[in-house]
Image: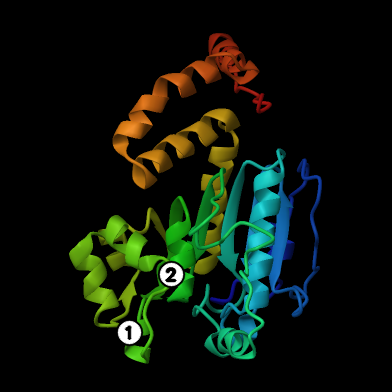
Amino acid sequence: MSSLAGGSGLIAQIGPGEGSQATETRSYGKGLPPPDQMVTVERRGEVCLIGINRPQVHNRVDPEAFSALARAYAAYDADDGLRAAVLFGHGESFSRGIDVDAFAEVLRTGKARVPDADGIDPLGRRAFLSKPLVAVVHGDTWNMGHELFLVADIRIASAETRFAQDENTHGRFPGGGSTVRFPREAGWGNAMRYMLTGDHWGAEEARRMGLVQGIAPDPRAALELGLDVAGKIARCGPLGIRATLASARMAVRQSEGTAYSHLGEQYRALYRTEDFLEGRKAEAEGREPVYRGR
């Protein structure tokens, strides 16, 4: 079954296993997550799983779901016990993008507000996560769905994933950040090839363009791969992980010169941490380090 939320239920299967140290997990047994819960949040040890849960409309994102996603991102970023997050979609698709009618109604009634006002913008246009995000996609990953995917630091796709950035064929344009990120990640010609024509593409083409770092044979295997990658991140020193992201993002969003100028300061700061000492001690003792984030 291609549906991640189908059958015995995704959350029941990706919740903490025997012996897990997870401090908070909701379980939905053999059923699906409640339909009124537009975004699910699960904890698996030091990894947070965030799921878009509107499968009845192919996980199209309306203002309420966008706001819930922003709050989930903010809660993950603020929780020192979480070191990596995995974003996925319940149902047959990751997301077919924006719920146009729902957003249009908000604008028409004059009740518009910044949907991420009480969280972190999932499209990364204003505030940004300070910790890693792994996106795992399957099925239709279109428009805003593709833009949510592009924001992630590491991206995994199921082999049958169908990507699209086809707003121009509908009289709109890609307004969620892909006009910035898509050319940067895939190259100008590759990005314009798909944004200007509205043609769809598959997982192998996404990998050719550098958009995907791993492809799995089916949606469940893709999620397992994403969890494995997130777990490896979570076992690293969290202070170093944050510094790595901060430095790389500084180079992209400001300049390489600015990023270079901060390297010494960032490195010296880590030398004074308990985690640095633990890393050295664990290496000398031939054991796995236990990082505390301080």
* Secondary structure category for the residue under label 2: helix
| Mark 2 Cα shell of 10 Å, populated few (<14), some (14-19), many (≥20) | many
Q: Residue 80, position in %: x, y?
A: 70, 38
* Residue drawn 56% across the image and 55% down it: 224
- Quadrant (top left, top right, bottom left, bottom right) of the C terminus: top right
The answer to whether residue 237 of the structure is visible from this angle is no
Q: Please state which amino acid type lies under the numbered disc 1.
A: Asn
Task: Quickly name the residue at label 1.
Answer: 168
Residue 146's tag is 2
Q: Residue 252, position in %: x, y?
A: 35, 45
Per the model, the C-alpha gap separating discs 1 and 2 is 15 Å
Residue 210's tag is none
The answer to whether residue 242 is above or below residue 84 is above
Of the two numbered discs 1 and 2 in the rendering, the one whose residue sits closer to the viewer: 1
Residue placed most toward the observer, 73 or 225 = 73
* Secondary structure category for the residue under label 1: helix
Which quarter of the figure has residue 146?
bottom left
